[in-house]
Amino acid sequence: MVSGTNSADDPRQGKGRGFFNRNVEPKAEVVEGLIREGQIVALGGPYRVGKSPLLHDLTICLLRGISWCGRKVIRRPIIAFDFESSSPMYKGNLLRIALRYQVPEPSVPNELAPYLQNDDPNEPLTARLLQALKSKNLGARLGLVDDALQSKPDAVVIVDPTELLFRIDTREKAHVTELFSNYRCLLAKYPKVVLINTFNMRKRDRKTRRRPDLLSDPRGWLEEICGTLDLMNRSDVRLGMDFYGSEDDGIKVINGLRRGEDLDPILIRPYGDQPHDLAGFERIPPDQVSLTKRLTVKQREYWDKLPKEFSFQEAVDIMGKANFSRLRGRALSQGILEDGFSGVYRKLLG
């Protein structure tokens, strides 16, 4: 035994609560494969891609414990700071989404605390927001978040967009560093909380002949068009949302990077036929986007070798555990693979 080590805290003895016995398990996934408790999330994308409607959809799913675009969620209260949606749009979106899922509308403020800048200033939460915005002090705005969390210490907090609540210049390193230092203090106080921040991407350089593709090259996409690398780099989860193909197709891709873990992309489209009927998003059916777009070249080669139905061991014999783990995650995320209860996988495309 190393000199000076307390045997009661020695993890090799399986006793005590020493440093290596505490906080050794990953935190719970609030959104399967995307977001864990205690994480800071940055969601970026071009103007009008649908970031706010996506968050409205996620709000109802989290409030009611409904799987979101094929991903399981843990039921959580929501604290939303919204600076861009009109009051009728925000409320209408949530009501249509609740109707789509056939669940009750959110209880305000017990389940949902909506701080809407564009609502009636006599609304209690809007009044508090407007009062906090009068202050030039970052602490006053952070205090508003802290106050909201006291009654909802396990909430998902949405700030849409970040710079309008905290009045930071996302291009300034010092501004971003100060904000994230305060965020980490909030998470130390409320370890089950998730902080989701949105921001609009800068305009693309029209002189660039080829832009990175978010589906196949999330790192390149984020570095090329975000314009706010400090904000992205200090986040635990860095997500992009972009149009896929023609904007008229309505297909969107969500992809990015998660610190220390793999992240699998999602292809989604608006749910509903007309603008006034839209009610969140749904995952794209398997046959509407080709395998070439959904999988990497190597993954496509492995996919073609798999039979229509196969067991875990059959897949491992073809490509090894690590390769199958990556392929399985991406294929399940894309909705092209069915994970059977009897241990049999079934390909839904190709």
Image: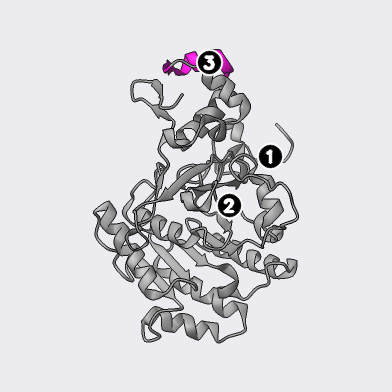
Disc 1 residue type (three-letter)? Thr
Residue 2, quarter of picture: top right
Is 333 included in the stretch rendered in magenta? no
> In the rendered image, which quarter is residue 232 located in?
bottom right
- Mark 2 vs mark 1, CA separation in Å: 46 Å
Q: What SS does tag 1 mark?
A: loop
Point out residue 277 in the picture as x, y percentages from the top left corner.
Answer: 32, 60
Residue tagged by mark 2? 240
Mark 2: secondary structure: strand
Q: Which is more foreground, mark 2 or mark 1?
A: 2
Q: Check the image and report above or below for 306 versus 134.
A: above
What number is the disc on residue 305? 3
> Is any atom of residue 154 visible in this view?
no
Look at label 3 and name its amino acid.
Answer: Lys
Q: Where 9 sits versus 326, above or below?
A: below
How far apart, in angstroms, are the residues tagged by discs 3 and 1? 53 Å
Front-most of 68 and 180? 68
Disc nearer the start of the sequence (3/2): 2
Q: Which circle marks residue 120 in the picture?
A: none
Which quadrant of the structure image shows residue 327? top right
Crowding at dot 1, Cα within 10 Å, few <14 / some 14-19 / many 20+, comes out as few
Name the N-terminal-most of marks 2 and 1: 1
Depth order, front residue of 75/275: 275
The residue under the point 44% across, 82% down is 128
Which stretch is magenta?
A: 308-320
Residue, disc 1: 5
Q: Mark 3 and mark 2 in contact? Answer it, CB < 8 Å.
A: no
> Callout 3: few (<14), some (14-19), or many (20+) C-alpha neighbours within 10 Å?
few
Asked whether residue 313 appears in the rendered view, the answer is: yes
